[in-house]
Image: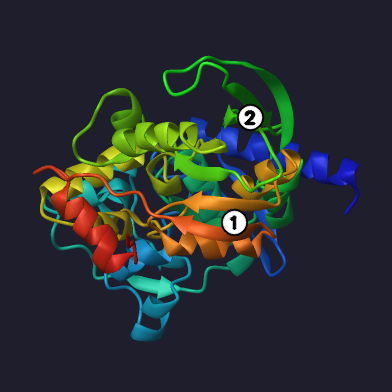
Amino acid sequence: MTDSRTGLGARQAARAIDALRRGWPFRVVGSDGALDLLAVESARDAALAEFASHDVLLSGERAVTLKLTNQRAAAAPGAVRVANAAATVTAALAIADPALDLAHPLKGPFRTVATGGESAAAAAMTMARHAGLLPAFFVREAVGEAETLCTADDVAALLDPARLQIAARARLPVAASETAEIIAFRSPEEASDHVALVIGQRDAGPPVVRLHSECLTGDVLGSLKCDCGPQLHAALHAMAGAPWGVLLYLRQEGRGIGLVNKLRAYALQDQGYDTVDANLRLGFPVEARDFAIAGRMLDLLNIPRIRLMTNNPEKVARLEKEGVEVVERLPLALPTNKYNEQYLATKRDRTGHQL
């Protein structure tokens, strides 16, 4: 695929995601079929009447929660299409939104049918996550002409980290270092800009690097439900004590599911679910972040070797997969509080975090 074709495809995917957010129908074409889709969360009944389909496409994770898959599918869930599941947006939301599970505990009985295009369905789920919406769509086989259309390859092009470039850089004195430099990274079709903060004087040795995913509630508002804010500031001060360091601040709120869905997960935690099960009930993977973005940022900064500050060994593996040599893993230990003890225990027991 040429650069011009990649750019065109990315723009088509960006337009389709805009239609998704606005509650407009769009088409995704995959290698094994094409689907017309209308996002449940943003849809209105008037649009649904025009769309004329009562089938609903759900993520595999949400389908497992609703017991719509067998054990094999539960181990590696793919999107599931439910036939004639909802005639109104309200009815579809009762299926798609786990916040309504207690109000509507008995759903179904449902009949599942072939999606009509596995690759198109998978691309749609990726688009919903990227848009910060619930992964649920009204769905039908492609009919007639589509005003907004993209392919599964277009979606991959939009999210390709190779499209990320350095957009701007400037000196930024911060509490941890008055000589810090901030560098912003941008992809042409993307609204979110990732940033790196370079602390200290660069030398020939590998820097201390911290991958930090955006957390509005923790970083800005001082939430006690997580340890993100304290980790961020502890990492910066640790870098100031090293020869040099780099903070990669990734705009992937809520482990990649977006701010609104993260708050939905918080509400589920108040019902007794841990962070892992809350994500799954929402219909998302436990880990939805794209660490290839961090690999691309390090490549653009010409940093092939790092000392990674993390309690998550999976980050080491994911970065090494992107060609970054992690010469050392540096744990980051911080005290707990009564609000985040369960959260940190879940990270330790269910997602492999360790000191």
Question: In the rendering, at what x and y percent does residue 154 appear?
Answer: 73, 49
Q: Which mark is residue 201?
A: 2
Observer-nearest of 203 and 95:
203
Quadrant for the C terminus in the image? bottom left
Asked if residue 290 can be seen in this view, the reply is no
288 relative position to 69: left or right: right
Q: Amino acid at mark 1?
A: Ala
Sequence-first disc among 1 and 2: 1
Horizontal side of 105 relative to 276 (left or right) equals: left
Q: Position of residue 64 (x, y in %)?
A: 32, 70
Q: Quadrant of the N terminus?
A: bottom right
Give the structural element (helix, strand or loop) at label 1. helix
Q: Is residue 170 left or right of residue 266?
A: right
Q: Which residue was labeled with disc 1?
A: 123
Q: Which of the 4 image quarters holds residue 30?
A: bottom right
Mark 1 is surrounded, within 10 Å at the Cα level, by few (under 14), some (14 to 19) or many (20 or more) other residues, namely: many
- Is residue 172 in view? yes
Q: Is residue 317 above or below residue 255?
A: below
Q: Are marks 1 and 2 in contact (CB under 8 Å)?
A: no
**Residue in view at x 25 percent, y 67 percent:** 349
The correct choice, above or below, for 110 with respect to 284 in the image is below
Q: Identify the residue shown where x is 25% and y is 54%.
A: 275
How far from the left and from the top, in percent, is residue 320? Answer: 62, 63
Residue 226 found in image quarter:
top left
Q: What kind of colouring is applied to the model shown?
A: rainbow
Residue type at mark 2 is Gln
- Considering only vertical position in the picture, is 189 above or below 53? above
Give the alpha-carbon distance from disc 1 to disc 2, as whole Å. Answer: 43 Å
- Look at 59% across and 44% down and name the residue there: 207
